[in-house]
Amino acid sequence: MDLKNQSLTLFFIIVINALPLCGQTVKKLSEIPIRDPYIMPDKKSGYYYMYKSASVNTSGKVMGGVEAYKSRDLKNWEGPVQVFTVPDDNWITGAVWAPEVHTYNGKYYLFATLNSNIQWKKEQQGWPKYLFRGTQIFVSDHPDGPFLPFAKVPHTPMDQMALDGTLWVEEGRPYMIYCHEWVQVIDGTMVLMELSEDLSTPTGDPLTLFHASAAGWSTGSSHDNIPVKSYVTDGCFLYRTKTGKLLMIWSSFMNGEYAIGIAESVTGKIHGPWVQQEKPLFTQNGGHGMIFRTFEGRLCMTFHRPNSPRGQERARIFELQDTGDTLQLLLELTL
C-alpha cells in the first residue's frame, strides 16, 4: 500500500470512528465466541479494543485475519470490524492465532501467529501434523489498522513451530517472548528473542527461558499410540509487580484441564533464570490470559473459558490483586 492510499485509509477510519453508534451492533461478552482474548485499553480514543482471530474469504481463497470489538465500559462491545487481513503475497497466509496489539513508541504493533498447511515431516499416528506456524509483527498508526508487514516471513525462527508471541520492553530494549510448540519438541518451551528498535526484525539468537515440565502443576498430556507425555506452553504475558518482581503468566494442562500458572525471574530481568511458582493462578478449564489496567486503574486479567468444547469459549475478566510477590485472582467482573 503506497503512502497516499494509506493516508486515505487512515482518514476514513478516523471519520468512521467519529460517527454515532446508531445502527452498530452491540454485544455482551457472553455473546462473543473467542479464544485467546486480548484487551488493549487505548487512552487516545477512550476505548477498550478486544482482538479476535477472523479469517476472510477473498475470491475463493481463505486468508487469515483479525477483527476487533471496542467498548467504553467493558460491558457493551461494538463491532466487529475487520482490522487486518494477511497480505496475499505473505509467505504464510493461513489462520491467525492469538492476536495481540501493543502500543510502543507511538505506534500500534500487531503480534499475530500465522498458520500454514506446510508439513515438515511424516505425521505420527495419534499426534498432530507437523505444520509450520510462526509469529509475525505488523504495524499501524491506529488501533483499527491498517496493520502493515515489515517483510513476508515470520519474526520467529524458520526452523521452529512457534506461536503466541508477546512484547516486553526492558531498559529501552524490546523483546519478543514466544512459545516453541510442543508438537515439535514434546516438552514445550518459552523462548526470548531481542527485536530491533522499530520491531521490524529479530536480533541475536533465541534463548530458552524454561520448559513446560518445569512447573509442578503442569502435569502434561498423553497421546494415542505414542509412549511419551507432552507438555504445552501457551499464552505468555509479562507483568512487573509493585515491588519490582518480574512475573510471567502462561498456560498448560493440569490433570487434563487448561490452567494458568506463574513463572518468576530470579534476577527481576527478562533473561532470568526463571522459577515456577508452586500455586497456579487458575485451574478450571480456562487459560491463555493477559493482564491490563482499566481506565480507572483496576488491575484485571482476561482469558477464555471454557477451553472446550469448541465454540463455547468466551472472554472472562477477573480483577487481580498484586501482592508484590505474586498475583491473586479476585472476583470475576459482573459485565
Image (cartoon, grey):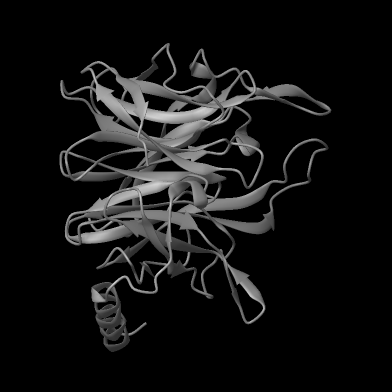
Foreground of the two, 225 or 335: 335
Spot the residue most to the front. Answer: 22
Q: Residue at horizontal 45%, vertical 32%?
A: 190
Residue 28 visible from this viewpoint? yes
Foreground of the two, 142 or 117: 142
Q: Quadrant of the C terminus?
A: top left
Work out whether 155 lies above or below 13: above
Q: Residue at horizontal 31%, vertical 81%?
A: 9
Q: Position of residue 306 (x, y in %)?
A: 57, 35
Q: Position of residue 39 (x, y in %)?
A: 35, 48
Foreground of the two, 148 or 41: 41
Work out whether 33 lies above or below 221: below
Q: Position of residue 112 (x, y in %)?
A: 45, 55
Work out whether 235 lies above or below 98: above
Residue 273 visible from this viewpoint? no
Q: Quadrant of the N terminus?
A: bottom left
